Image (cartoon, rainbow, N blue to C red):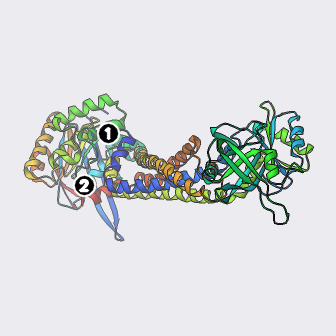
Amino acid sequence: MSEAGPVLLATALLKDYPMNGETVHALRGVSLRVHRGDYVAIAGPSGSGKSTLLQLIGGIDTPSSGSVEILGTRLESLKDRELTRLRLTRLGFIFQRFHLLPVLTARENVELPMAEAGLGGAERRARARELLAYVGLGGRADHRATQLSGGEMQRVAIARALANRPAVLLADEPTGELDAATGQEILDLFRRLNADGTTLVVVTHDQRLAAEAGRVIHMLDGRILGD
Amino acid sequence: MNGLGWGVKSLARHPLRTALSLAGIAVAAAMLLDMVMLSGGIEKSFSEMLLTRGYQVRMTPKGTLPFDSEATISGASRLVIALRSEPGVEAAGAVLGTSLYGRASDSLVTLFGYGIEPQAQALYQLTAGRDLARDDTSGILLSEPAAGLLRAGVGDTVTLVGRLDPQIAEAAIGRKLLVRGQVRWLYDYRGQPSVGTLLPVMQRLARQSSEDRASVLMVKVRDDALVAVVAERLRQRFPQLEVNSVADLVVHFKQRLVYFRQLSYILGSMSLIVAVLLVATLLTITVNERLGEIATLRAIGVSRATIVRQVLAEGAALTFAGATLGILLGLGTARYLDAILTSFPGLPAAFSFFVPRADTLTFAALVLLITGSLAGLYPAWLAARAPVAATLRAEAT
């Protein structure tokens, strides 16, 4: 994979779902190219297919047809175990509802992907503390997820997503559960992340977030209207 | 954070539900332990009781077991001499068991009498005073209940009266004896008032002197001889007698109490099934509640194997905690149940139904831990197969 090549390449993605005996066409031929350091916002109304697109390019779901490449690796050629490993080491995920493990502390949540990747305990702890400090939660490392506010939980989720130094950070409505002020903190953090070299693909219907991105892709009815 | 630590923390999410499940598993584990103790404890206890004094062979009238009937052996002294001359025999003695009376104030109380040979006895342990000498025809040994009934202690004189036989028009034989010691008769039931005198004294009181009768002959085998070989040789030399080694008696005993073993197997299996169902149910509920969390973990790259390990670890942690509580509960209930069962009339007080042994505890704990951990397989499979994309979509709406 050359430095100049795309980090993420999606080609002619189609995705159909069976629902109540009918077929829902969630994506109708979407292609997308993301380069290192890009900050891409995918915007569109509910049901436009933006979250489905994020799941396909994140290797969480498989397309009905079309292909996805991450750093030159075609996802459809990978076995489940290889795909899981790729998600662990090459991609970082941020969800609307944070999805932290409530029984673990902020630090343990951040350590979790690193433990799965086989990093040693001392190295994990040091990096988790470093990442929590980066997202402004250095003093909350030993608090349980349930003891954190919504904004803090999302920042822990961002630190978790960064744990294994992913090539791309994929975020699905990261400010959807937050109030305006807290959402702004997350936008600021994304801006800083991108400035520090992180490639971001963010699905949102938050106009402020879309305005922050260097590139906005508008979707409607499973198609890209504009890039 | 390893799978076990994560599993334990996950269980702490719903403390009340986990506590109730733990209580259920502990009760099932206690029952399993009790049943395992019961299934092996009876024969173990019986064998240990018979070997308390090291006499490994009992000889009784043909077709009977020791003290199982009133049948007796004639020519006891001659037989004992013959036995003592047998190769492989270290010691031998005769015992006569009979019912008789003791005088307490102006009334008679019913007692059980042992005629013994103190130099070769396998029936009692001295608890106070001293043992009878081999020629002490005026001495007597009392059990604690007998001492209570006769209101006599060491150094006191008691009067024994032989059984009155209405078919013999003779007065019952009476005899004054000096209490030499207090003993614990090994095969007495709880509260049994028993006394012991030298064999000839008891034979006279029981009108068994003329034929020198005894109920049982006891044989101690030398350390360098095999009990089974000696028993077989005695069978051939004394075909008119029933020769049973302790191992033979244990077999007889097991045959009589086979229903106890069957009952313990059935109840033990049921306990195990209940424990497995409890673990599987709790984990299945937990996994279904956490499908969103599991889908998230899968999405961020946590492998199916890690998810499976985590659910299995949760099951193992639950089972381990339940088994630990269950062992304590099982030991407590075993003592209580043992006290009830051994209070049945006719059962030796030294006998136990529930014998706690390290191997029994280990076996019950291991069976429970393995099956309890395996109970997590189905919920673990559910967790590993959770549809990641669909679950995340459902979570987002």
Left/right of residue B48 with respect to residue A93 in the rendered view? right
Q: Residue B327, how many percent across, how many down?
A: 49, 48
CA neighbours of label 2 inside 10 A, class few (<14), some (14 to 19), many (20+): many
Q: Residue A31, how many percent across, how many down?
A: 26, 50
Residue B387 appears anywhere in the view:
no
Q: Which residue is mark 1?
A: A113
Secondary structure found at label 1: helix
Q: Quadrant of residue A143?
A: top left
Residue B182 appears anywhere in the view:
yes
Q: Residue B95, how many percent across, how many down?
A: 79, 46
Residue visible at 50% across and 47% down in the picture: B369
- Provide the chain ID for the residue under circle 2: A
Q: Which residue is mark 2?
A: A51
Name of the residue lying farthest toward the bottom: A21
* B74 over A165 or under it: above or below: below
Q: Quadrant of residue B106?
A: bottom right
Residue visible at 60% across and 57% down in the picture: B264
Q: Nearer the viewer, residue B336 or B81?
A: B81
Instruction: Using the numbered discs, state the Cα–Cα distance from disc 2 to disc 1 in whole angstroms.
Output: 23 Å
